Image (cartoon, rainbow, N blue to C red):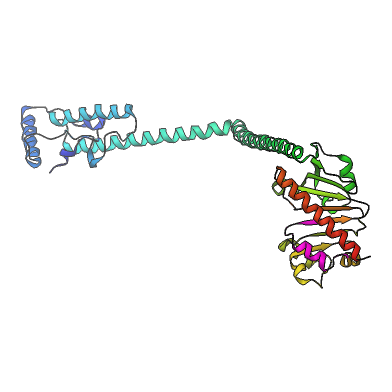
Amino acid sequence: MSDVSIFGGRVDYGLLAQQAPPASADTTDANQTTQPSAGENSGSSEPDVSELGNRNGKPERDSGTREQSGDLEVRRQELKKAVEAGTMTEAAALKAWDELRAQSGKRGSDENAAGEEGNKDWIGEHLALFLTVVYGGIFTLVIGILVICFVYVARREKARTVALETATTELGLRFEPAGDESLMVDLGPLPLFNQGRRKKLTNLIVADTPDLQVHVFDYLFITGYGRSQKTHRTTVASLRSDTLVLPSLQVRPRKAFADGIKAMFGAGGVAMDPYPEFAKTHVVQSDQPEQACEFLDAEMVAACEGNPGCSFECQAGVLLHFRAGKRVDANAESIRDFIGEGFQLFQNVSECLQRNV
């Protein structure tokens, strides 16, 4: 079948001009004779140009715009009429149509490229504005997250203070939500209060007896900076009495990795060779190692092992009891139990002192 059946995609005005009209009746007769021949090859009496614009199965709107599609349609119709009138051969019309479509496609590509280049030029010309919008958005998002976290923490701490005050009233004890600065000064030499920054003592519960001053409070401090910054919150029981003639001492649960590294550099604490199992789970630190070893006898070691996760620190006249990084629940039962643990530790220490007299 002749290519005329798929004719409809390529038209060129120049080629139309090359096909001059017949000069005589003989030429007309010749063209009329040629026309049926083409019809015979295509299986019809006249050329089929109804599919112009759909050559190779592609839609006529390859240009990608309505304007270009309209131009192609006009030229297709002109080319079709030229073929039907015999002023242009089918082969010439098909060639012209291919060239026209190629030119239209190239023009569309150039326009798209120009559009993309225009976008790039806009960003380049407004780079400062672009960066301001991007980084300003990120900054605003970060600030928003920090504000949300601050508000959440503030509300949580306020609710805890209210609950602790209610529980303290139920236990018949005195509550001081703002804490006591003088107590912070008195406890300053102990290891717990010699780390971090922005230290804060709040939610103070006073449970004094005639011979013993008992204070339970929330203690906060911050370590590290940037992404490594960490806020530590711990509930502490402080017991003070003139009967506590104690060496400077700290006993706490062992941290496998951190304490292992310290041991490699000779900072593993006081050696507790008589109690190897205790040494595996606890670290003893003191600037008076001999007195510390004498104080930690078998009964005292057993008392420490019987209260897993607990730490205690002491010096002359003061004894601290706490679980590092943990706070007591804000209810009367939990507070009563925590104070009871502090009294039990005080009793164990007092008995140890009597044995060593």
**Residue 105 or residue 64, whichever sits in front:** 64
Q: Is residue 323 above or below residue 124?
A: below
Is residue 268 visible to us here? no
Magenta highlight on residue 70: no
> From the image, which quarter does the C terminus lie in?
bottom right
The location of residue 321, given as percent across then percent down, is 80, 53
Q: Quadrant of residue 202?
A: top right
Q: Is residue 178 above or below residue 269?
A: above
**Residue 20 or residue 33, whichever sits in front:** 33
Is residue 52 visible to us here? yes
> From the image, which quarter does the N terminus lie in?
top left
Q: Is residue 79 above or below residue 266?
A: above
The location of residue 36, given as percent across then percent down, is 6, 36
Task: Give the magenta range.
Answer: 295-312
**Residue 12 or residue 19, whichever sits in front:** 12
Q: Residue at x 21, y 32 (%)?
A: 18
Q: Residue at x 13, y 35 (%)?
A: 48
Q: Quadrant of residue 122?
A: top right
Q: Residue at x 50, y 33 (%)?
A: 119
Q: Residue at x 53, y 33 (%)?
A: 121
Q: Number of numbered discs present?
A: 0
Q: Quadrant of residue 40?
A: top left
**Residue 133 or residue 39, whichever sits in front:** 133
The location of residue 231, given as percent across then percent down, is 73, 46
Horizontal arrangement in the rendering, residue 225 relative to residue 347 (left or right): left
